[in-house]
Image (tube, rainbow, N blue to C red):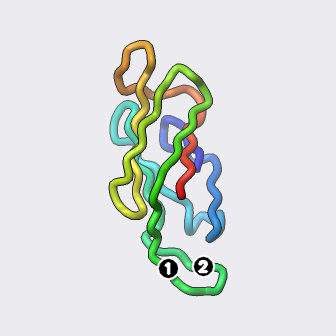
């Protein structure tokens, strides 16, 4: 999923599809803190409903002036925190934030 610092999702894709019904929701919790929530269950290619159990989040930013940190808080929820390198404090980055999950 890719999103901006206002929580607007620009792209998302997964093995279960990229329709709005499976689009993750990005909540801006405070400056530099974002909670990304995927559906708790999805329908696989065989039509079977499966509980979603994401394990690892790999962050990427469009600029090198920030350091991202990711914490898995639930099977379908990740917390992304973005720190500005100059001040070392939470900050809203310019450009897109991308989180690949496994």
Look at 56% across and 66% down and name the residue there: 22
Report the Cα–Cα distance between label 2 and label 1. Answer: 7 Å
Q: Relative to 64, is 39 on the left or the right?
A: left
Residue count near mark 1 (Cα–Cα under 10 Å), binned few <14, some 14–19, many ≥20: few
Return the x and y of residue 52 as percentages of the image width and height: 46, 70
Q: Relative to 87, is 93 on the left or the right?
A: right
Residue ID for mark 2: 44
Look at 59% across and 36% down and name the residue there: 96
Circle 2/circle 1 CB separation < 8 Å: yes
**Earlier residue among tags 2 and 1:** 2
- Most extreme residue toward the top, as rendered? 86
The quarter of the displayed image where residue 87 is located: top left
The quadrant the C terminus occupies is bottom right
Name the element at disc 1.
Answer: strand
Return the x and y of residue 39 as percentages of the image width and height: 47, 67
Residue ID for mark 1: 50
Name the element at disc 2.
Answer: loop
Q: Relative to 23, is 80 on the left or the right?
A: left
């Amino acid at each position: 999923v890719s999103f901006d610092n206002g929580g607007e999702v620009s792209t998302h894709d997964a093995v279960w599809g990229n329709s709005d019904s499976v689009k993750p929701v990005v909540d801006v919790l405070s400056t530099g803190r974002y909670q990304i929530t995927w559906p708790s269950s999805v329908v696989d290619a065989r039509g079977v409903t499966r509980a979603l159990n994401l394990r690892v989040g790999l962050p990427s930013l469009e600029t090198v002036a920030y350091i991202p940190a990711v914490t898995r808080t639930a099977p379908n929820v990740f917390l992304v925190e973005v720190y500005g390198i100059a001040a070392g404090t939470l900050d809203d980055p310019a450009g897109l934030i991308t989180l690949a999950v496994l």
